[in-house]
Image (spheres, rainbow, N blue to C red):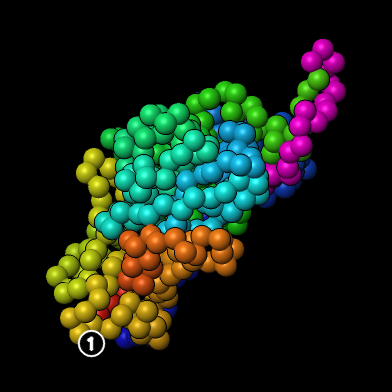
Amino acid sequence: MSSSIELPRWPQLSDEDIEAAVAALRSNRLVGLGNSVVTDFEAALAAGQGVEHAVAVSTGTAAVHLALHALDVGPGDEVIVPTHTFIGSASPVTYLGARPVFADVTPDTHCLDPDSVKALLTERTKAIVVVHINGCAADMEALSALGAEAGVPVIEDMAQALGTRIGGRPVGGFGDLACVSLFEQKVITSGGEGGAVLTNNPAYAERVRRLRSHGEGPIEGRPGLIWAHEVGYNYRLTSVQAAVGHAQHKRLDAMVEARRHNAAYLTERLGGIDGLELPVEPENTVHAFWKYVVRVAPGGGRAPAAEVAATLRSRGVPVLLRYPFPLHRQPAFAEHQGVSLPVAERLSQELLALPSHPGLGEKHLDHIADEVRRAVTA
């Protein structure tokens, strides 16, 4: 197949998404507080993830920040975070004056390794952030048990995992809190940026609602008046964003099914290539396949993954190494650069994320598979 084929981009907004945004604009009620457009979206998110409360916020990183704040994370505390993830899983720890402690990941799922977490738990550990990376479910049974035994709350970072399930249950209700991202490239978007905090704990939900809007709330016994109960943030989601997110959420199941179809198609086309390891789907889980990540095993005369990626890009397939710099090796976290986390360090030079989003048809997937085969076996 010709290497000149152009791959569609993601996201792809529908007419319904755009009409929902226009309707919200025409309402002339744009700020989220008390707006039914926002509360309806929150209700849909909560119901979809099987939790009691969803609080819409401005970004996925803001969601992590607010979840940590709701747990009173602060100076002197430690929060365990996987090193193989986006920086937004870890940077909010430092916003609150606490210290991220980076843990390794498993070689097959690339999610947080319970054994690594167990070795890092101390009396200073205030929370564990578990990332369902690429849409693959982390081992919540083992990680929740570790948290419960140590008396440490667990936050699910499901920025990449709307549509992921464990034992038939959607992720987001296994930890004490969960964090959603609605960034433009995620499974669904609220129009570029957005996020949400999920929880079954009403006290956490109420505090997150207050913190997202400057810490303000009603004054008991003085109807109609508010004041700042504590210092908070401006992390509100607008009604326009909520309208787009709600319209997209109505198609969540179909979009996840399309991702899973494309992943299965790529798996069929890429099977049997020596040195190419395909994604795993842990038993009793549903992988949302936000990313279709393959491993190019070193040796055997194959080009390293970085060279394979460069070759693919030259042939019209937009591929990069998947998290080529573990967080503990980046300048923002320089104090951790002496730490050894061997699995994540190795994977950083071996993983590639292939395009697989719902906008791709079989002709696009055939092109991707053909070019991957050529690049890996050259």
Q: Would residue 53 appear left or right of 263 to someone viewing this image?
A: right
Q: Can see residue 29? A: yes
Where in the figure is residue 246, as x and y percent of width and height?
55, 42
Residue 179 locus on image (x, y percent): 52, 42
Report the front residue among 126 and 20. Answer: 126
Q: Is residue 227 magenta?
A: yes
Q: Is residue 53 left or right of residue 119?
A: right
Q: Is residue 363 above or below residue 220?
A: below
- Please state if 218 lies on the left or on the right of 124 as rendered: right
| Residue 61 visible in image | no
Reading the image, the residue beneath label 1 is: 378
Residues in magenta, as a range? 220-240
For this view, does 330 lie left or right of residue 357?
A: right
Q: Quadrant of the C terminus?
A: bottom left
Question: Residue at 59% of width from left, 53% of height from top?
Answer: 91
Q: Residue furthest top?
A: 221
Q: Identity of the amino acid at label 1?
A: Ala
Q: Which percent across, then down, holds residue 51? A: 47, 29
Residue at coordinates 35% horizontally, 48% vertically from top-left?
A: 116
Instruction: Describe the element under mark 1 as helix, strand or loop.
Output: loop
* Residue 5, placed above or below residue 65: below
Number of marks drawn: 1
Q: Residue at x 57, y 23 (%)?
A: 202
Residue 368 in magenta stretch: no
Task: Answer with the quarter of the image where residue 348 lies.
Answer: bottom left
What is the x, y in percent for residue 227? 83, 28
Q: Quadrant of the N terminus?
A: bottom left
Residue ID at (50%, 39%) = 125
Please identify the quarter of the rendering in which residue 213 is found. top right
Foreground of the two, 186 or 83: 83
